[in-house]
Image (cartoon, helix red, strand yellow):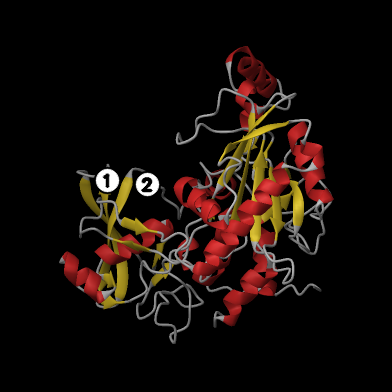
């Protein structure tokens, strides 16, 4: 959700979307989706190429306005090993390193609720119902006619809302496939095993789950204050005061301050890695709790993993959490790339500009040297980046794993669309926030029956 994420704005590479199109999804190539990225955003800050960026959208996208000596040293060191500065990784070229672009403006997060929902709340044709848990898609034959929900959540009053035109499912890559499954739409064997009546067989519902899996390095540092110390005691009070006085402060920082995009194979020069840096470190094995000593974190992950997982309902109860099996590092090629990513992360920690600050590697530690040791460390302490997608993948009728067509309509159904990250047919070289908004923007034109925006063809 854009209300709780790291508010990073990162679209992905041209080849990602061209790959979607090449899979048989007409209208989803880079030239087709670029105008929808532009229509979403209002780019504010550093000069950007207008061929790629938008100026008039609802979503403010700004540059991080907070610098740190460790970030500067990290980027300088990256340059010394051949990774260039990139003034706009959402522009012509993604490759390189820079401070992050983010969905924040005037010291406040810009969520999709703030950017798109709040301005529309007064519309007569919009009703927002909160604390309403969808329990079933109502069907008449193969036609979706409404949604059942529980007002007040589990144990609440059973309610229904009827659709005059169509039902749009936007539950995300976990909830959308589960709701389809408990409504009788999905793999026949799964539904039969759960005692759910089969309404429409679609083998791909809940399959093709992919995520970015990120091993992390942390180091203890010296000669500089990090966010670890600034987040405690009197220093934290000072940071809070600076925030309320309109100054630069850690209070509204993104979890990662620097983003880089590079490759695991020097010969192929395929941009298949993403890495992040932040002048903060976390207690080993404790999620979200900062170390008491000064530290920094470097994480790296594979852009386009081939390992596939799944989401499956545990029962016909829509309130029971589904089973999520990501199958991280199941693919041999993924294992090779993640080891290369970890080696790059360590190399970036030890550049000449980092030496005045680097004390020692806290995790995984200098004893980790072989590929097998790197892989063991990745498996033990790596984690999700929460970029889950693909569980209602888009594809043509000829694709047995496809759930929706290129108009986002559920195959074999009438008046039912899915519009969220679950429809993405292949993983992007990016966090998914920006692309999910693009999917919604493009999907809105489809729902309204509008002609798609004119493609924007830009030179390579």
Can you give x and y, in whole percent of width and height, for residue 286 in the image?
45, 34
Secondary element at tag 1: strand
From this viewpoint, is residue 216 visible? Answer: yes
Q: Is residue 387 above or below residue 408?
A: above
Can you give x and y, in whole percent of width and height, for residue 8 in the image?
63, 47
Give whichever of 138, 70 is nearer the camera.
Answer: 70
Residue lying at the far bottom in this picture: please name it. 398
Q: Are marks 1 and 2 in contact (CB under 8 Å)?
A: yes
Q: Which residue is mark 2?
A: 129
Image side of residue 145 versus residue 285, left or right = left
Residue drawn where x is 41% and y is 48% of the image: 128
Give whichever of 445, 105 is nearer the camera.
Answer: 105
Residue drawn where x is 74% and y is 38% of the image: 71
Secondary element at tag 2: loop
Give whichever of 430, 370 is nearer the camera.
Answer: 370
Which quadrant is the C terminus positioned in? bottom right
Residue lying at the far left in this picture: please name it. 195
Can you give x and y, in whole percent of width and height, for residue 410 in the image?
39, 74
Q: Which residue is mark 1?
A: 151
C-alpha span from label 1 to label 2:
9 Å
From this viewpoint, is residue 45 visible? Answer: no
User: Which numbered disc covers residue 260?
Assistant: none
Residue drawn where x is 48% and y is 52% of the image: 376
Occupied quadrant, residue 34? bottom right
Image side of residue 46 versus residue 314, left or right = right
Occupied quadrant, residue 409? bottom left
Q: Earlier in the sequence, mark 1 or mark 2?
A: 2
């Amino acid at each position: 959700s854009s209300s709780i994420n790291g508010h990073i704005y990162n679209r992905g590479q041209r080849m990602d979307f061209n790959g979607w199109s090449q899979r048989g999804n007409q209208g989803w190539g880079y030239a087709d989706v670029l105008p929808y990225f532009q229509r979403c955003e209002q780019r504010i800050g550093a000069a950007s190429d207008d061929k790629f960026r938008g100026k008039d959208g609802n979503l403010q996208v700004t540059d991080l306005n907070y610098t740190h000596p460790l970030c500067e040293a990290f980027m300088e060191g990256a340059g010394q090993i051949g990774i260039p500065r990139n003034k706009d990784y959402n522009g012509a070229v993604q490759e390189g390193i820079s401070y992050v672009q983010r969905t924040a403006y005037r010291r406040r997060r810009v969520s999709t609720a703030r950017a798109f929902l709040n301005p529309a709340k007064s519309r007569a044709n919009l009703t927002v119902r909160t604390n309403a848990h969808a329990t079933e898609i109502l069907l008449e034959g193969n036609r979706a006619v409404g949604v059942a929900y529980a007002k007040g959540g589990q144990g609440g009053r059973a309610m229904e809302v009827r659709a005059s035109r169509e039902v749009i499912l936007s539950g995300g890559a976990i909830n959308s496939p589960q709701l389809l499954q408990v409504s009788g739409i999905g793999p026949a064997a799964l539904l039969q095993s759960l005692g759910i009546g089969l309404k429409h067989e679609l083998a791909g519902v809940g399959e093709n789950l992919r995520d970015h899996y990120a091993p992390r390095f942390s180091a203890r540092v010296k000669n500089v204050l990090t966010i670890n110390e600034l987040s405690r005691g009197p220093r934290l009070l000072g940071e809070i005061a600076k925030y309320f006085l309109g100054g630069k402060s850690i209070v509204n920082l993104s979890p990662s301050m620097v983003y880089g995009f590079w490759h695991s194979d020097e010969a192929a020069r395929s941009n298949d890695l993403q890495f992040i840096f932040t002048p903060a470190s976390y207690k080993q094995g404790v999620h979200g709790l900062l170390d008491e000593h000064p530290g920094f974190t470097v994480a790296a992950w594979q852009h386009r993993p081939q390992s596939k997982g799944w989401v499956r309902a545990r029962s016909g109860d829509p309130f029971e959490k589904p089973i999520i099996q990501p199958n991280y590092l199941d693919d041999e090629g993924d294992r090779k790339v993640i080891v290369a990513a970890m080696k790059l992360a360590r190399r970036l920690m030890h550049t000449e500009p980092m030496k005045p600050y680097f004390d020692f590697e806290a995790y995984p530690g200098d004893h980790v040297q072989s590929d097998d040791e790197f892989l063991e460390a990745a498996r033990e302490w790596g984690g999700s980046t929460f970029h889950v997608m693909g569980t209602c993948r888009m594809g043509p009728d000829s694709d047995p794993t496809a759930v929706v067509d290129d108009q986002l309509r559920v195959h074999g159904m009438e008046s039912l669309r899915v519009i969220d990250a679950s429809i993405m047919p292949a993983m992007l070289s990016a966090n998914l926030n920006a692309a999910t908004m693009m999917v919604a923007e493009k999907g809105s034109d489809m729902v309204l029956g509008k002609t798609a925006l004119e493609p924007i063809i830009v030179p390579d």
